[in-house]
Image (cartoon, helix red, strand yellow):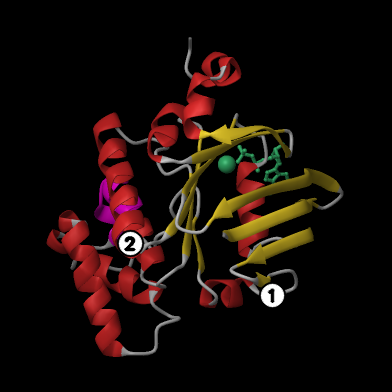
């Protein structure tokens, strides 16, 4: 069963079209990799899916057509985005950032329980709960951005280049957390990355974008073995 089906998506900036009839799908409960070189249009695709920029084409999410719906409504329906560059509120504390992420959740008790759940998964966030987000390390800010997105109780989490600028050990820790969230909460996860190898190790399926469209797709194992991926990303 498909959680997300994208068909013939066109989007861009002003007169410049970046996406060219982009089509792909994400199975319910899967971890899927959306790969591609810098400038391929990955961020533009996520912005179109989250409703941040207008798009033409079909976006079916959990059986609902998203075209025309506001970004806030898409979050309410369970589609959450962790933007490239993280976008935490640097002057607010860690805990305030988490509370802000829960704006779709009405019950105070639920919010408190969710904060506890994510502190258990991200112990360093608990230690820093009273610190402004701007004082955290890059890795901690990325963890906070992910935890904040999880506070909206998403069915599907989209994460834009989470490993950007992070040390390899921190990236591995973060990817292990994606696997846990996927396994324990059943959250479907779409990871946009330039780090193809690491992402394909936790994903079941992957798509490779080039100038606004999918040029290659397959199971993670197929893509890891493919010569295109080897040459383009894995330095083989
Ligand atoms: N805000 C913007 N205004 C105009 N062009 C943009 C903007 N953001 C991105 N682009 C252009 O869109 C193309 C795709 O960019 P982007 O989606 O950010 O790619 P990726 O995330 O794969 O690196 C690039 O040619 C980029 O220069
Ligand atoms: Mg990008």
Q: Is residue 55 visible?
A: no
Answer left or right for 168 relative to 45: left
Which residue lies most toward the front here?
Answer: 1
Seen as rendered, the residue at the extreme left is: 127
Please name the residue shown 29% across and 32% down the image. 167
Mark 1 = which residue? 69
Q: Camera-side residue: 123 or 225? A: 225
Q: Which mark is residue 105?
A: none
Q: Which mark is residue 147?
A: 2
* Mark 1 crowdedness (10 Å alpha carbons): few <14, some 14-19, many ≥20: few
- From the viewer's perspective, tell me whether residue 144 is left or right of residue 116: right
Q: Residues within 10 Å of mark 2 (few under 14, many from 20)?
A: many
The answer to which quarter of the image holds residue 162 is: top left
**132 or 44, nearer to the observer:** 44
Examine the image and state in which quarter residue 226 appears: top right
**What's the residue at 41%, 61% (across, down)?**
187
- Can residue 170 be seen by looking at this rendering? yes
Instruction: Using the image, determine if residue 58 lies above or below residue 166.
Output: below
Is residue 123 found left or right of 118 in the rendered image? left
Q: Nearer the viewer, residue 95 or 216?
A: 216
User: Residue 100, how many percent across, how many down?
Assistant: 38, 75
* Label located before the other in sequence (2 or 1): 1
Residue at coordinates 69% horizontally, 75% vertically from top-left? 69
| Stretch in magenta | 133-143
Which image quadrant for residue 67? bottom right
Within 8 Å: ligand 1 and the Cβ of disc 1?
A: no
Q: Is residue 155 above or below residue 197?
A: below
């Amino acid at each position: 069963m498909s959680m997300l089906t994208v068909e013939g998506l066109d989007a861009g900036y002003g007169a410049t079209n970046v996406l060219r009839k982009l089509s792909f799908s994400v199975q319910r409960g899967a971890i899927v990799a959306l790969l591609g070189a810098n400038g391929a249009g990955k961020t533009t695709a996520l912005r179109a899916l989250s409703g941040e920029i207008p798009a033409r084409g079909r976006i079916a999410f959990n059986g609902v057509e998203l075209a025309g719906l506001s970004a806030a409504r898409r979050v309410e329906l369970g589609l959450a985005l962790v933007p490239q560059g993280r976008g935490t509120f640097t002057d607010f504390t860690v805990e305030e950032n988490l509370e802000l992420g829960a704006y779709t959740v009405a019950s105070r008790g639920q919010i408190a329980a969710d904060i506890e759940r994510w502190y258990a998964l991200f112990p360093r966030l608990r230690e820093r709960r009273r610190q402004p987000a701007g004082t955290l390390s890059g890795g901690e800010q990325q963890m906070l951005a992910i935890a904040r997105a999880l506070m909206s109780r998403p069915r599907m989490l989209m994460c834009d280049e989470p490993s950007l600028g992070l040390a390899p050990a921190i990236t591995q820790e973060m990817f292990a957390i994606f696997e846990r969230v996927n396994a324990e909460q059943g959250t479907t996860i779409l990871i946009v990355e330039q780090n193809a190898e690491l992402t394909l190790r936790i994903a079941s399926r992957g798509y490779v974008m080039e100038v606004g469209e999918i040029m290659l797709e397959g199971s993670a194992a197929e893509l890891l073995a493919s010569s295109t991926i080897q040459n383009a990303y894995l330095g083989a």
